Image (tube, rainbow, N blue to C red):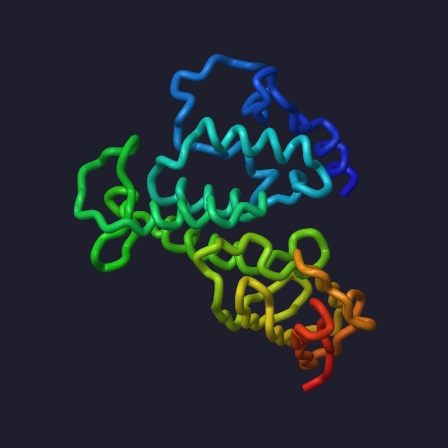
Amino acid sequence: MIKIANALSDLATPQISSDGRIMEWSEEFKETDPRHRHVSHLYMLYPGNQIDPQTTPELARAARKSLDVRTDVGTGWSLAWKINFWARLKDGDRAYQLLKNLLHPTENHMLNMSDAGGTYPNMFCAHPPFQIDGNFGGTAGIAEMLLQSQNGYIELLPALPKVWKDGEVKGLVARGGFVVDIKWKNSIPQKVVIKANVKNKCIVRSAFALKVDGLTEKSMELGGSYVLEFNAEQGNVYELSPI
């Protein structure tokens, strides 16, 4: 562990370039292709959590600018990664646009990495010619739009696009050993069921006013289940009860 800690201290930290983007390298090299599909330097945004709109707003703005320059064009795995990036930046509509790009029908089997992608009629990701990363990554992106838990708490509907005004999802797994079902209407959660697979403390937050006695730091037992029901008459108040 000491060796790992020492090695981590030698790693470069995220820096913002002179044009306002996250630096891809330790120096500002001139890019051959500014729109290139690779976005590995944003790993700290997703799946990492060192870049976050709330805790590191300047880095989050720089990450957004990096994505704008890279554009929404790409192949399967790149589009899937961008869906997750925009979800972490809490921009559901932009994530949804990338999801549409990933799923647009195509029959192009040519090895064109600069302007290809989409989805074949059999729902395989057209990387091309095929790459499962696009399918798995796109699914991960949808989950990330509906539930996030990378900061030590469960966040409900963090990047919900306007077109998903009403909906329901079941079985999303959050960090900490929790399984979450969410039903929402008019973009507001109506019923949330949280099940604990391990004994752990459950912290829940959302973009909406959230006021539940004991819920924000609720210790849940193995196999325990709780339901949160929205009460519109009380103004964005959730009521918690065991089931």
Q: Quadrant of the N terminus?
A: top right
**How far across and down, in percent of the image, does residue 42 sit?**
55, 35
Residue 188 is left or right of residue 215, and the answer is: left
The residue lying furthest to the bottom in this view is 243
Residue 98 is left or right of residue 90, and the answer is: left
Q: Quadrant of residue 199?
A: bottom right
Q: Identify the residue at image location x=51%, y=72%.
A: 170
**How far across and down, in percent of the image, does residue 79 sit?**
40, 42
Q: Identify the residue at image location x=28%, y=49%.
A: 104
Name above or below for residue 159 compared with residue 199.
above
Name above or below for residue 201 compared with residue 142.
below
- Judging depth in this view, the residue of 194 and 240 nearest the camera is 240
**How far across and down, in percent of the image, does residue 142 sit?**
47, 57
- Judging depth in this view, the residue of 197 and 216 nearest the camera is 216
- The answer to whether residue 197 is visible is no
**How far across and down, in percent of the image, does residue 62 sit?**
60, 29
Marker count (numbered): 0
- The answer to whether residue 239 is visible is yes
